[in-house]
Image (cartoon, rainbow, N blue to C red):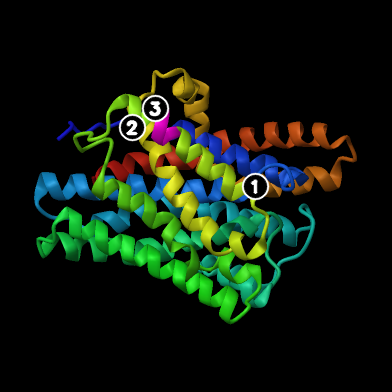
Amino acid sequence: MASHKEHIPSLDGLRAVSILLVFVSHCNLEHLVPGGLGVTLFFFLSGFLITTLLRQEFESRGRISLRNFYLRRIFRIWPPFYLVLLVSAALTLLGVLPGHVSCAGLTAQLLHFANYNLIWFQNAIPVGTGVYWSLAIEEHFYLLFPMLYILLCSRGVSVRRQAAILAAICGAILVWRCWLVFGLHVANARTYYASDTRFDNILYGCLLAIAANPVMDRQIVADKWMKYVFFPAGIGLLLVTLLVRNDSFRETLRYSLQGVAMVPILVAAIRFPEWTVFRWLNYRWISFLGVISYSLYLVHQTVIITVQQRLPLHPALQGLIAFLLAISITIALHAAVERPFAKLRKRFR
């Protein structure tokens, strides 16, 4: 077994790629840049990282503290989550930000049901906070998954059987999406935003962390096969999921294929951080962008929409100004909120 690493190479760089995909897409370029892929990559990376930490805790201590897990999640997610949301709502009510906010919409976000508000109710929410739908999915997932993983570990279920169970759940979610799309003919929003249809995006990362973790496990695929066969195959499969424009495919099989494709990409990025293909992911400024990607994700769309409505400039200039403003706000948020709570969070590792 490989030694555990405190810092996982390329992970922050991949987070930076995710937030850049989302940011550029939201600058009215969604027809050219796959912002949805950025969100899916966020899900995958989250599942991989958190399951790796849970697995390390179990293998080193023989148990997993559910209390400490949820405290770590609270200190990581909630402070910037609620601060950005409440400030956005206040500025909207004061007329500083465009749009309006409803009590029902804000309550749904506060209680982590933003995704189902988008699907069923469309109650008004502060401008730019529509991105909270993906955070609701993560909160729902991590309310359930640690208990499943603890149960499997405490019962002595083998790694192979754990992987089989997670793979079966991923397959069941794909079948459920197919039934919704082909049997019930639901709108695309139902499969795109709902927790029950997107959990597998996170589970594929969990599956990799358990079955073939490039941080913890001995590698069974030779370097040349990973670099020149499996990695290109993963990139090719991702491209296929982006090029096929059929709505039924995009809301059913696409998410599953993207999860499969991301496995060799992440493994290669972690195993070969000095390879020319991935070296740039580990540049300091790219890594820092990944470190602040969560807060940047929270604020970016509010800034983009505000700049677009208040500054009648060329779209490219609007995007640049929005990026610089969003980065400035995010750095302040990271220093004032994320870093202090990160120190507190370390006490529960």
Residue at (54% x, 35% y) in the render: 17
Residue designated by label 2: 8
CA gap between label 2 and label 1 equals: 31 Å
In the rendered image, residue 316, in percent from the top left (x then y), is placed at 81, 33
Q: Which residue is mark 3?
A: 227
Cα–Cα gap, marks 1 and 3: 23 Å
Q: Quick one: label 1, few (<14), some, or many (20+) residues within 10 Å?
A: few
Does the magenta-highlighted stretch encompass residue 229?
yes
Disc 1: which residue: 243
Q: Residues within 10 Å of mark 2 (few under 14, many from 20)?
A: some
- The magenta region covers 227-231
Residue at point 33% right, 39% down? Answer: 343
Say which element carries label 1. Answer: helix
Numbered badge on residue 106: none
Nearest to the eye among marks 2 and 3: give it.
Answer: 3
* Amino acid type, callout 1: Leu
